[in-house]
Amino acid sequence: MIPLSAPGSTPSHDHPGSAEPRGLSFSDTRFDLLRHVTPVIAAVLIDAAFFLRRSRVIFGEAPAEAAARRLHKMALDHLHDDQGRRIARLYRIFVYDAPPAIWRGMRKVALRLGEVPASHVHWQLKPGVIKELAKGLRKWEALGDDDFQLNLRQKGVDMRLGLDIASLAYKRQVNQIVLISGDADFVPAAKLARREGIDFILDPMWATIRPDLSEHIDGLRTVCPAPRGPTKL
């Protein structure tokens, strides 16, 4: 039997934020009955670097603990439809990051750590500070430690994410995968999961995604509020 799809099963290039499955309505009594007979078991996979980058665009700067709570809530929100009704069971939340990671000890979270070579670690100005400098609102000699952020270029995360998608699909541990990312490098993994009958949902957090990624998913759904500014990465 083909696994049932959660909201978001119709791809969209203009990113409406939510979508309904093809030909079915969650208000349909027969569909509700069928959904209980064949429950949706979902795994939520999160590219932590992408999440943090988009979270700063949408919500602004936040302490590490607040970002961790927001990530966890966002993953759980994908288990509900747009009316807040539970439509899926959680298998596990997979978070892909590089040390130091802020997601340890969270309920149902499996942390997948990449590596950060010493040559890939450097400090950079925060985006807001760069804008203020460009507008003449700040002077270089007035900059302090708080105006910089650590930039970690991680390695191995994409590989671990792809392997987990393949493992979940081949072992039939889930029938739905929700990926929170906007990277087209995951296209081969998404195609593999779909061939195995997995309902593959992408949440790019309102970022503009490349057409080749949009073509190889079953749905596009974002559960966070839309940013006020541009939606590009």
Image (spheres, rainbow, N blue to C red):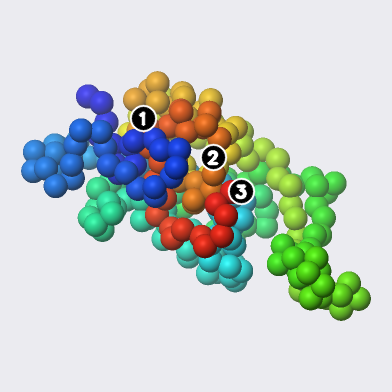
Q: Position of residue 33 (x, y in %)?
A: 10, 41
Q: In the image, is 202 to the left or to the right of 183? A: left
Along the line of sight, the residue nearer the viewer: 110 or 46 = 46
Q: Position of residue 221 (x, y in %)?
A: 39, 46
* Element carrying mark 1: loop
Label drawn at residue 104: none
The residues tagged by marks 3 and 1 sit, at their Cα atoms, a distance apart of: 27 Å
Res. 108 visible in picture: no
Residue type for callout 1: Ile
Which residue reaches farthest bottom?
Answer: 142
Disc 1: CA contacts within 10 A as few (<14), some (14-19) or many (>=20): many
* Mark 3 or 1: the one toward you: 3
* Element carrying mark 3: loop
Label 3 sits on residue: 233
Along the line of sight, the residue nearer the viewer: 14 or 183 = 14
Q: Position of residue 220 (x, y in %)?
A: 40, 41
Label drawn at residue 209: 2
User: For the point 46% across and 23% down, which residue is it?
Assistant: 192
* Mark 1 or 2: the one toward you: 2
Q: In the image, is 217 to the left or to the right of 189? A: left
Which corner quadrant holds the N terminus? top left
Residue type for callout 2: Ile
Tell me if label 1 and label 2 are in contact, CB under 8 Å: no
Res. 5 visible in picture: yes
The residues tagged by marks 3 and 2 sit, at their Cα atoms, a distance apart of: 8 Å
User: For the point 49% across and 50% down, which residue is it?
Assistant: 206
* Element carrying mark 2: loop
Q: In the image, is 29 to the left or to the right of 205? A: left
Disc 2: CA contacts within 10 A as few (<14), some (14-19) or many (>=20): some
- Counting residues from the start of the chain, the first of labels 1 and 2 encountered is 1
Label 1 sits on residue: 198
Which quadrant of the structure image shows residue 2?
A: top left
